[in-house]
Image (tube, rainbow, N blue to C red):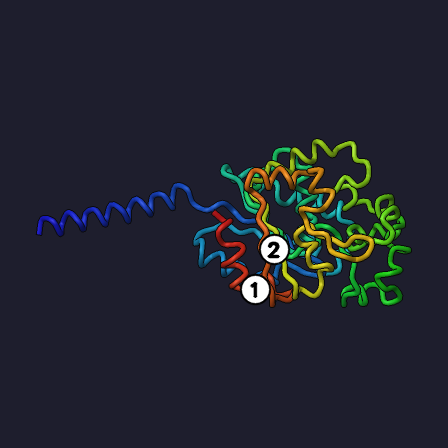
Amino acid sequence: AEGECRNFARLLWTLFGACLVATVIGYKPVVIVHGLFDSSGVFVELLSFINQSHPGTNVSVIDLFDRSSSLQPLWKQVEGFKEAIYPIMQNAADGVHFICYSQGGLICRGILSTLPNHNVHSFISLSSPQAGQYGDTDYLKYLFPQFMKSNLFHFCYTGVGQRISICNYWKDPHHTDMYVNGSDYLALLNSERSNPNSTVWKKNFLRIKKLVLIGGPDDGVITPWQSSQFGFYNDNETVVEIKDQDLYLRDVFGLKTLNARGDLFLCSMAGVEHIKWHSNDTVFNTCIEKWLV
């Protein structure tokens, strides 16, 4: 009986210790940034997944630039989201996690590059066109019915075009010079255009502890889908994967450094359509859950 009591006491102490650790450490707050034509309301399932796996997590879905407002220029959106997110960071002594979906992944990169004292731990980029976009998608037909991917450069790489978010990361592999000179956002983030702030931006970006790049071949919107993992077309429209990309090889903004640190993770999943990434429990369990600690 004495032995059983001792075992029971040990079990109670273990449980108490586990509860104490969970209470003291807790989970870092999670910030979610939505994509093109979205709003905060689309993340119901994702919020449920986080609550089930990491109970008590403080999750903020930033309700800005919703629906048609998501077409506003990305630098404007970066400033707006930054203003909303910074107080959350200030109240999180141990840092926060970012889950940034689709166009939101590029907005988050803008925030991470230009905010010198951010405390983002895991930056989870969820099917985001990080290397650019070049494809005849339903979005394109809806926005620019008179254009196809082959001639959109005529509009996108103008001052007027750059006032529309999708043109900020439209990357025509057949008109690279026009992209470099005309893109006010992605070409600057990638330092493909001369950027006097590139060293500082790289230092800021490398404050993250983990970079998780999620995407898959059945996405249907991000084109090529490998752009979600920094792969992109060459001028023959052959996909060049991340580790053969110039911006990786030259470590332009820190991808190679992150990989050398062991902090760059690619998670690819087939069978997931673009609008399903944040509501798919297998995606969450495989690609997201482990990084939210």
Marks 2 and 1, how far apart at CA: 14 Å
Q: Which residue is mark 2?
A: 214
Q: Tell me which corner region of the image, top left, top right, bottom left or bottom right, holds residue 247.
A: top right
**119 or 169, nearer to the observer:** 169
Residue 14: give its label: none
Q: Nearer the viewer, mark 2 or mark 1?
A: 2
Q: Which residue is mark 1?
A: 279
Where is residue 244? Give x, y as percent: 70, 46
Q: Give the side of residue 44 with respect to residue 188, left or right.
A: left
Where is residue 264? Give x, y as percent: 58, 45
**Regarding mark 1 in the picture, which secondary structure is present there?**
helix
**Regarding mark 2 in the picture, which secondary structure is present there?**
strand
Circle nearer the N terminus (2, 1): 2
**106 or 79, nearer to the observer:** 106
**43 or 148, nearer to the observer:** 148
Where is residue 263? Give x, y as percent: 56, 42
